[in-house]
Image (tube, rainbow, N blue to C red):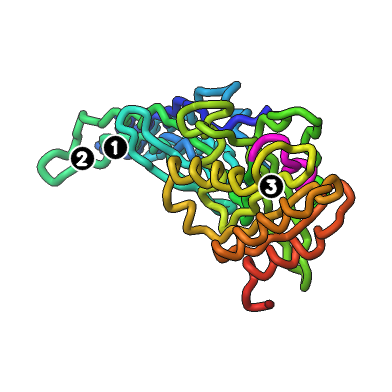
Amino acid sequence: MFVDEVDIYVKAGDGGNGCLSFHREKFVPYGGPDGGDGGRGGHVILRVNSQLSTLIDLRYQARYQAEGGGNGRGRNQTGKNGEDLIVPVPPGTMVKDVASGELLADLANANDEFIAAEGGQGGRGNARFKTSTNRAPRYHQPGREGEERSLHLELKLLADVGIIGLPNVGKSTLISRISAARPKIADYPFTTLTPNLGVVSASNYRSFVVVDIPGLIEGASLGAGLGFQFLRHIERTRMFVHVIDLSSLSDRDPVQDFQTITSELAHYDPDLLARRQIVAANKIDALDDETRLLTLRKFCEQEGMTCYPISAVTGEGLGDLLQGITRVLFPDEA
């Protein structure tokens, strides 16, 4: 199951109480105060684990509480600090405060971490309050309560290339051919219900990550179909591969298909249209009318985009497509 949004509650450990104690030892009269400080409560820390790609574990355990600090003891012994609680999250996790909606952290890189709740400070023992005029203080501090809050975690997958297009145009087949990803593939719309990530090995020992976004349709920005539920996962991509169905079995206009998707992108976030786009004209193995390809190519030239005729099923043209993607991502090697 793919989970990209979840609410959790975090509670840091309370600080330990300071100790009220006086030194007692034979032949040592008036030993004085020797109460130690309490230990700090444990923090709740969100830390990126690059092996994770979903927030599903946090859905089934939504409450996290760190260990409290130990109380101070006599003989000036400080209480033990509470152990920090580490909560692993996938790269690309955004942390927001539920009450205010404020963005608290954007955990994008491996081993990034954020203290979601700070442990309470330990109270001071009575030894801390000894002065020249108060040599036997009978006051000590209680530990402070640890921070607690409700958080909303939102995952935006980190990928270099976003594969976009209408349902059933061959996006899942394409990602399965160019990477080790194995998405569900079938001949009906909305086969893919969750984003799929894949790593592609390019030339010169380079590699990049692609994400297959579940099919969009006209009106997605208004909630039609899958809506724009998964569009957040292409916000971090550096470029788009727009897959168009060119097969003669399709009764849709390829240019209109392209314009439909770009219109939905513009409604979601106009800045997305500034990303580099290339067009993958798919299913040329089932193309009987060459004018469909010629029309799409002419349109792409007018828009300043490169069109790559491919067949994700047979593998035809995939080499040229990958080279085109590599030239965009790694222009220094072009």
Question: What residue does disc 1 label?
Answer: 124
Give residue 87's position: percent from left, percent from top: 55, 36
Callout 3 crowding tier (Cα within 10 Å): few <14, some 14–19, many ≥20:
many
Answer yes or no: is residue 180 visible.
Answer: no
Q: Is residue 172 magenta?
A: yes
Percent position of residue 189, x then y = 71, 29
Residue occupying the point 54% across, 40% down: 231
Q: Which mark is residue 244?
A: 3
Q: Is residue 76 above or below residue 188?
A: below
Q: Nearer the viewer, residue 74 or 98?
A: 98
Q: Is residue 329 above or below residue 142?
A: below
Segment colored magenta: 166-175
Q: Residue furthest left?
A: 133
Q: What's the mark number on residue 224?
A: none
* SS assignment at label 2: helix
Give the labeled residue for mark 2: 129
Mark closest to the chain's N terminus, 1 or 3:
1
Q: How many marks?
A: 3
Pick the front one: 247 or 332:
247
